[in-house]
Every structure is written in structure tokens, then in C-alpha cells.
Image: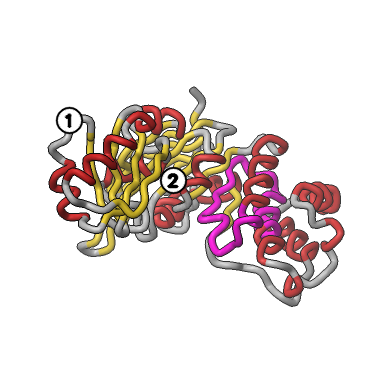
Amino acid sequence: MDYIIETNNITKKYDDFTAVNSVNLKVPRHSVYGVLGPNGAGKTTLISMLCTILRPTSGTGTVNGYDVAKNAKKVRGSIGVVFQSRALDDILTGREHLEMHAALYGVPKELRKKRIEEVLDLIALGDKADEYTKTYSGGMKRRLEIGRGLVHRPKVLFLDEPTLGLDPQTRENIWEYIRKLNQAEDITVLMTTHYMEEADKLCNEVAIINQGEIIIADSPINLKRELKADTITIRVDQPDKFIQEAKKLDFIKDVFEIDSEIKLMVERGENLIAEVVNFANNNQIIVNSIELEHPNLEDVFIKYTGTSISGGR
């Protein structure tokens, strides 16, 4: 397989703190690849090394065939970057942002107008291109930032938490633009996120990162399939007693308590709801609510880290 990004034990340390610890990634060309993990897991540090903003403490990484430490200039010419923090100037129009970025990246003057129009069409901002960005909504600003990262035709687009702080509808719109640019621009997208649904819907492959280490990487379908379990989520009046007694049941593979909810990992959960309720009643435990969920990436994260992505246990 053709990999456009590869790392070999890439590590970043700050004195005694290891932000990224011996990470190995292989990102297929033309894919949408997600690095999924909680805040503070090392996602932004990893991207910053791949973008040549930070120099690795040890290990190596290549982007589009160029070493991130030895060929930083070549790497930068191959990538576009959209970080979490907003980086737009309110006194410039959308078009002026794109023109400035195209000039900085050396897009020939005779090609700039055509390329800018293509990008404006891709991000659906043609009718707002000559308005100041201070008048833009949060979603429009994010689309402009993505478009700015595309104007020089990079081989790889890095998106660091691309929908952070956006409302659900705007997030879904951004997802659609990411899918569109991946297909229309024939571009590889590497994105970080802590939104399970975002990783599940957008990414061909997901690497789960926690405390600076990659725990597992595979397609979302394979990661969920590997669990071979459904989740029964239950709220009861005596959670400690329920958990203690539930661990004795043969049909329960695992049990966690997260944010006052007890999660039971089982096979064929639809056949076990009544049995779980009867079990609680037989132990004089009141069931306040119960529901069944099929495997999702949150369950995968819990299995491999022992915590939810928000940090609860």
C-alpha cells in the first residue's frame, strides 16, 4: 500500500513529561485518517511534529516522502494546516485571505484567480468572498480556514479538531465539506478529534491515542466488530451493589461505571434486557432506566483505555 505519512517511534518530550511516546502511524494516500483521543492525549503535539512546527525528540516521520526533521521546507510545501485556534483577520475579506495565502505559498500570479475561484466554489463561499470575515458565522470561518489550507493544492491537509465549538448542524456541514474535498481534490486528510461520531462517519481508518501512545489503529468498522458485544446501559438506585453482583453473571463480559451509568458488555443484548431487569429485582435493586446500544467507538475506547473519552470511569 502507498503511505503518504509514516512515523517510526516518533516521540516528543518536555523535560520529564512525554507528550507523544513512540508513535507509529501509516496513513494511506487519498484517505481520511483520524487520530481519536481526549484533550491532552497528544493529538496536537503529534500533528505539530508532522507539520514541522515542533521537532521530534526522537524517532522519525515522513510526509509525502520527505523527512519532517531533515526536509522541513519540502514538507511544508506539501501540506495545508488548519489548527484549533482561529487565525483569521477580521479586517480582510474571504478573498483577500485566500489571495494572501496563495502568494505566501508561491502560487503563480496567473493561476491565483482561477485557483481561488475553485476553492471558493468548493467551500461554498463565493457569494460571501468579498465581505469582511468579521461578518462570517463560525461555520463560514471554519470553511474559509479549510479553503485557505487548500489554495496551494497540498498533498495532505491536517485538520486539528476541525469542528470544535461548532453547533451540531454546522458540524455536519463541515463533515460534508471534508468528504467533498477528499474526493474532489484527491487529497489525503489527517484529522484529530475527540468526537466519536465524527471519527466514525468521516474516517477510513482511526488511531486511538491516549496519554501520548497509540493504543490501536484500524477502520471504524473493524474496531467495532472486534468487540463482538453490545452495551446495556443501566441506571439503578444501588450501583455499587449491582456492579458487585453483576460481575458474577456468566453472560456479562465486562462492566464499567461511567457518569452514574453502568455499562454491561454482552453478546446479543436484545435477548438479555429482561434477564438483567429480573436480576436487579431479585437483588432488591430498583432499575431507573435501561437501554441497549450496539458497539460504537466509545465502547472501543473504553475497552482499550478503561475510561471514557471524557475521562470518566
SS label for mark 1: loop
Alpha-carbon distance for marks 2 and 1? Answer: 35 Å
What is the x, y in percent for residue 272? Answer: 31, 32
* Residue 120 part of the magenta segment: no
| Residue displayed at 82% across by 62% down | 129
The residue located at (60%, 50%) in the rendering is 80
Identity of the amino acid at label 1? Answer: Asp
Which residue sits furthest top? 1
Between 36 and 166, the one nearer to me in the picture: 166
Q: Specify the quadrant that holds the C terminus.
A: bottom left
- Residue 253 image-quadrant placement: top left
In this view, the residue in front, 222 or 159, is: 222
Q: Quadrant of residue 156?
A: top right
Q: Is residue 59 visible?
A: no
Instruction: Name the residue beneath numbered marker 1.
Output: 250
x, y percent for residue 127: 86, 59
Residue placed under numbered mark 2 in the picture: 35
Q: Nearer the viewer, residue 136 or 256?
A: 256
The answer to whether 35 appears left or right of 227 in the picture is: right
Q: Is residue 286 left or right of residue 5?
A: left
Q: Secondary structure at mark 2?
A: strand
Image x and y of residue 251, in percent = 22, 30
201 over 289 or under it: above or below: above
Tag 1 or tag 2, which sits nearer the N-term?
Answer: 2
Q: Is residue 303 left or right of residue 4?
A: left
Dots 2, 1 in contact, CB < 8 A: no
Which residues are the magenta region?
143-171
Residue 19 image offset from top left, x and y in percent: 31, 57
